Image (cartoon, helix red, strand yellow):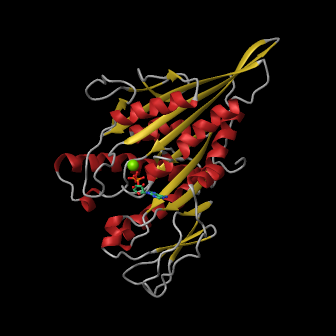
Amino acid sequence: MSGESVKVAVRVRPFNQRELDRQSKLVIKMDGQMTMIYNPEAPNDEPKKFSFDYSYWSHDGFIAKEEGITEPKPGSNYASQRIVFDNLGQGVLNNAFEGYNCSLFAYGQTGSGKSYSMVGYGANKGIVPITCDELFKTMGTNEDPNKRYEVMFSMLEIYNENVRDLLSKDNPKGGLNVRQNPKLGMFYVEGLKKVPVGSYAEIEKRMEQGTQQRTVASTNMNATSSRAHTVVTIIFDQIIKSENGETKKSSVMNLVDLAGSERADSTGATGDRLKEGANINKSLSALGNVISALADLSMGKKKIVVPYRDSVLTKLLQNALGGNSKTIMIAALSPADINYDETLSTLRYADRAKKIQNKAVINEN
Ligand code: ADP
Ligand code: MG
């Protein structure tokens, strides 16, 4: 994925039981890179059309229930977890070996398939575990005695604008502090655990540990959905010995499973849930503003201040969305008419992200 530094993929999940029970209609159609969405209230209108780097269909065909809303050809745009890794994860890996920072984030309403794509369920491992597994496999093929690798792992969540270390059992009330490095300007989480990992199995164990610590609350949308942003960070160092000493090529991979993008009012939230919704949307709208500022910058507009400071999420992702990083976004979509508004808003968000062009630089120190 050299050249372009932002790749955007959309992935539509199969109907869930609730949608099947309600005999929901399919509103999404995919054809090559094109994704089309039909307004269920005006099914004969032209669909809204979007074009992304990848448009992933997750299932083989549903019966069309209305004119103008037809099923895709069986197999067309069908994407298994492996295909998603081959298209996107492999690029993350190659970039890491070249010394670029990379970030991969999943956006979409609760229940749209973010965690399925990122982490996966059971045997259907998502892009994060496959990428970690392949990282160690590729490291294992190194035959250069002057080259060695170090891998560090951390996992945090941002919940109501507070940062919690998911590898730690005792987080301070109000969360860990987010500070700015006075020299480099980058934000970091003070006291966050970074653990060395020597194998894929160790990463898997750490991910499980982190997942158990996550804040899980239920909303009407999805009984066990996480209402927090989850950030897994892999620091990958390549240390090369030469006559002049050692040089280190360092790459940071941020793997972000964002909280649901739905508006608080559509989930019947009140009280604490509503406050959560507002904070989640604060981070996501800050992320959207950062994305569009970067898009304006990349289109040659000057005097743009990129508002990284507006939320914890954008502070921590500065590195991932700024000048020296490659970014991948997977926008997760429901196929069903009942989610039309949220799905359209996810498509528009993804469309904005597509317009960023980062300038990548290699970190060497
Ligand atoms: P989110 O993390 O966005 O809240 P999940 O990833 O948990 O949503 O997905 C909701 C449900 O849909 C899960 O049961 C998941 O297994 C299923 N699902 C999501 N995406 C896919 C897919 N591409 N293929 C098959 N099942 C999927
Ligand atoms: Mg999830």
Q: Is residue 257 above or below residue 148?
A: below
Question: Which residue is more in the foreground, 3 or 211?
Answer: 211
| Picture quadrant of ligand 1 | bottom left
Q: Is residue 202 above or below residue 288?
A: above
Question: Which residue is more in the foreground, 227 or 346?
Answer: 227
Question: Which residue is more in the foreground, 188 or 104?
Answer: 104
The residue sitting at 47% across, 80% down in the picture is: 63
Q: Which residue ends up furthest to the left in the rendered image?
A: 271
Percent x, y of residue 68: 49, 85
Q: Look at the image and tell me whether residue 68 can be seen.
A: yes
Q: How many labels does the image show?
A: 0
Q: Is residue 277 above or below residue 96?
A: below
Task: Tell me the quadrant of the picture where the C terminus can be found.
Answer: top right
The residue sitting at 65% across, 48% down in the picture is: 5
Asked where in the image residue 149 lies, by quadrant, the reply is top right
Q: Viewed as shown, does residue 149 lie left or right of 274?
A: right
Q: Is residue 45 above or below residue 347?
A: below
Percent x, y of residue 126: 52, 47
Asked where in the image residue 42 lies, by quadrant, the reply is bottom left
Asked where in the image residue 33 lies, by quadrant, the reply is bottom right
Q: Which residue ends up furthest to the front in the rendered image?
A: 123
Q: Look at the image and tell me whether residue 289 can be seen.
A: no
Percent x, y of residue 188: 46, 27
Question: Which residue is more in the foreground, 217 or 355?
Answer: 217
Percent x, y of residue 301: 59, 53
